């Protein structure tokens, strides 16, 4: 079991379906269903790896408001409550709209990391094998502490950022050992992006681009370029959290075996199963379930070179 410290915002979300984007104005919209769920990149990753058998410690803030009561009960239920969860006046919240094909749009409010005591993060990170730090203003203050003070390898998911010239992402690109991102927002091919990251940032050893139903592309420091097709073991319900699931399952497998190609093959199946669930933090497999599913859905990576 790996000890992973995860840092980021935890939100209470309201999720509802829509016919299509953009939405036409309507003073009243009848939805066939509306669901409430706890979400957030760090929470999603921690929820996934604890299901896989690792020991995550979540560093996040939760409000003392009514939304915070729901979030805290959820954290306790899934085994993520602890000293890393710090109380602030108001909880972060988000609204998630889901198209029939599972694509999502989000709108949310997020609190700042200024309310999080850095000594609490240091306490939670002692003995950790990896720090997973959210790529948003909340996560930025933790980067140098994890990398320079605690000497921890850092993993981050840039989500749908711009290219390597995106100045808002520079602190993460400069600190992270493992970098994931979505293909959305790319102005070049995924293969070109991973090669650019590995050339520009010598501290990065693994760069991955998730491509949704097209699979994913990974570049490794040793020069290998790995392409893996997507797997869909069950119908897609929502793509919300798919990238977090791919990221989390990869980190679990990589820390366990040290084999990044094998870890990404398993992560593709893990994420492919997860998108059949309704919310970002649901639908995670156990390690045994994932191993069984790999026997049914064999995945084969294609290995080339990015240099």
Image (cartoon, rainbow, N blue to C red):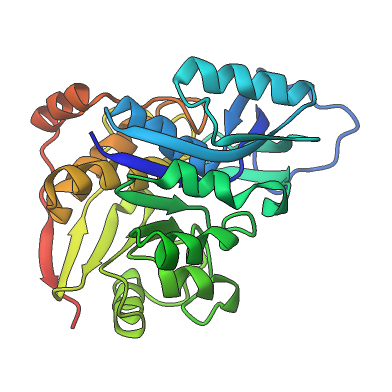
For this view, does 113 lie left or right of residue 45?
Answer: right
Q: Is residue 274 above or below residue 223?
A: above
183 vs 259, nearest the viewer: 259
User: From what the image shows, is residue 112 above or below residue 307?
Assistant: above
Q: Is residue 2 left or right of residue 115?
A: left
| Residue sitting at x 42%, y 68% | 148
Quarter of image, res 94: top right
Kindly tell me whether residue 11 is visible in this rendering.
yes
Which part of the image, by quadrant, shows the C terminus? bottom left
Q: Quadrant of residue 233?
A: top left
Q: Is residue 35 visible?
A: no
Q: Quadrant of the N terminus?
A: top left
- In this view, the residue in front, 45 or 85, is 85
At horizontal 13% and vertical 24% (from top left) the residue drawn is 292
Residue 10 position in % (x across, y down): 61, 37
* Residue found 44% across the figure and 36% down from its top: 57
Give the quadrant of residue 199.
bottom left
Spot occupied by residue 71 in the image (x, y as percentages of width and height): 64, 24
Q: Is residue 108 left or right of residue 223?
A: right
Q: Horizontal and vertical percent for residue 251?
A: 28, 47
Residue at the (48%, 43%) spot, across then down: 123
Looking at the image, which residue sits at the far right? Answer: 27
**Residue closest to the eye, 270 or 253:** 253
Q: Position of residue 241 (x, y in %)?
A: 47, 40
How many marks the image carries: the answer is 0
């Amino acid at each position: 079991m790996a000890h992973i410290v995860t840092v980021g915002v935890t939100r209470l979300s309201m999720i509802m379906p829509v016919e299509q984007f953009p939405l036409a104005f309507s003073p009243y919209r009848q939805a066939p269903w509306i669901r409430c769920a706890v979400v957030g990149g760090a929470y999603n990753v921690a929820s996934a790896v604890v299901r896989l058998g690792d020991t995550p410690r979540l560093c996040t803030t939760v409000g003392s408001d009514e939304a915070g009561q729901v979030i805290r009960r959820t954290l306790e239920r899934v085994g993520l409550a602890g000293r890393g969860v710090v109380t602030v006046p108001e909880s972060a919240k988000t609204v998630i709209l889901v198209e029939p094909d599972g694509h999502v749009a989000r709108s949310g409010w997020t609190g700042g990391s200024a309310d999080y005591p850095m000594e609490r993060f240091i306490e939670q990170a002692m003995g950790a094998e990896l720090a997973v730090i959210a790529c948003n203003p909340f996560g930025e203050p933790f980067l140098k502490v994890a990398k320079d003070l605690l000497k921890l390898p850092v993993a981050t998911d840039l989500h749908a950022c711009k290219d390597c010239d995106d100045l808002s992402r520079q602190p993460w690109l400069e600190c992270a050992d493992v970098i994931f991102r979505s293909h959305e927002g790319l102005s070049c091919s995924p293969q070109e992006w991973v090669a650019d990251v590995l050339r520009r940032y010598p501290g990065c050893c693994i760069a991955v681009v998730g491509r949704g139903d097209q699979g994913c592309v990974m570049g490794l420091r040793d020069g290998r370029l790995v392409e893996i097709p997507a797997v869909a073991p069950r119908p897609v319900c929502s793509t919300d959290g798919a990238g977090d699931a791919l990221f989390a399952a990869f980190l679990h497998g990589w820390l366990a075996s040290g084999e990044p190609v094998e870890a990404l093959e398993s992560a593709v199946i893990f994420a492919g199963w997860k998108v059949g669930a309704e919310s970002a933090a649901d639908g995670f497999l156990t390690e045994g379930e994932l191993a069984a599913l790999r026997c049914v859905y064999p995945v084969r990576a294609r290995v080339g070179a990015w240099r």
